[in-house]
């Protein structure tokens, strides 16, 4: 991998050779996604960090939850939009387009989620994550009660907060390192 091909502005090339388990995981990404997401390549300078990142991501975004995969991706995009995280707006905006089958929804999540008709459930969820991202010290019982009234369980609220918290962290790492999204994301599900 040449320096020009690094997914961030940091000189942290991937471990070479990759451990077999990591190489296998990257091959699965290629098969399923048609690429290895740059965020994974970025973490691959330290396999323990990559494994910790992917374990948390997979738990939050793929494990059983009262939240659908689309709802979790919507959270990722709205948090990333508030934070203006280029990488995550592009990557997770593509996921919203793909999962919803609605390019307008993916674009609205990136630009202004209030510009498109959404269910009361989704409006409540996205208002919560927006407030949590912008002013976490101002979260209170009223915010949780609003989610409960929209049909979310306490476990769902935990999951909403956890997904939002994870993307607030990853947005900051992506911003600090100038992480670039894979070109393939730009054309997906349009």
Image: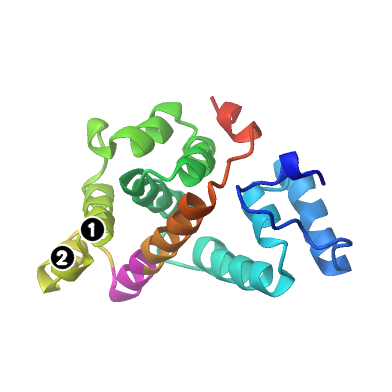
Residue 46 vertical placement versus 29 (above, below): below
Give the residue drawn at x 58%, y 40%. 181
Give percent across and percent down for residue 74: 40, 48
Q: CA distance from mark 2 to mark 1?
A: 7 Å
Residue projecting furthest to the left: 142
Give the residue drawn at x 38%, y 52%. 75
Q: Residues within 10 Å of mark 2 (few under 14, many from 20)?
A: some
Q: Which residue is mark 1?
A: 128
Q: Main secondary structure of the magenta part?
A: helix
Name the image quarter holding residue 172: bottom left
Give percent across and percent down for residue 138: 14, 67
Q: Which residue is mark 2?
A: 143
**Residue 186 appears in the figure:** yes
Mark 1, secondary structure of its residue:
helix
Name the image quarter holding residue 134: bottom left
Mark 2, secondary structure of its residue:
helix
Residue 102 vertical placement versus 137 (above, below): above
Tell me where the magenta segment starts and ends, as one range.
Answer: 153-161
Give percent across and percent down for residue 28: 78, 53
Name the image quarter holding residue 141: bottom left
Is 165 left or right of 112, judged from the image as shown? Answer: right
**Residue 34 appears in the figure:** no
Give the residue drawn at x 15%, y 62%. 146
Q: Are marks 2 and 1 in contact (CB under 8 Å)?
A: yes
Give percent across and percent down for residue 66: 40, 65
Q: Earlier in the sequence, mark 2 or mark 1?
A: 1
Give the residue drawn at x 70%, y 46%. 6
Is 172 left or right of 47, judged from the image as shown? Answer: left
């Amino acid at each position: 991998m040449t320096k020009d091909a690094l997914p961030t502005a940091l000189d942290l090339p991937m471990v070479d050779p990759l451990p077999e388990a990591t190489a296998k995981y990257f091959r699965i990404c290629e098969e399923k996604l048609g690429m290895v997401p740059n965020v994974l390549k970025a973490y691959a300078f330290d396999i323990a960090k990559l494994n910790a990142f992917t374990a948390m991501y997979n738990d939050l975004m793929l494990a059983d939850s009262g939240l659908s995969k689309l709802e979790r991706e919507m959270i990722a995009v709205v948090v990333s939009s508030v934070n203006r995280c280029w990488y995550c707006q592009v990557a997770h905006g593509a996921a919203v387009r793909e999962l919803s089958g609605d390019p307008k929804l993916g674009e609205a999540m990136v630009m202004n989620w209030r510009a498109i008709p959404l269910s009361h459930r989704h409006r409540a969820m996205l208002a919560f994550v927006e407030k949590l991202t912008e002013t976490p010290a101002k979260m209170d019982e009223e915010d949780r009660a609003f989610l409960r009234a929209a049909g979310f369980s306490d476990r769902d609220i935990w999951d909403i907060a956890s997904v939002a918290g994870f993307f607030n962290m990853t947005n900051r790492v992506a911003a600090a390192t100038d992480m670039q999204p894979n070109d393939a994301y730009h054309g997906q599900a349009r």
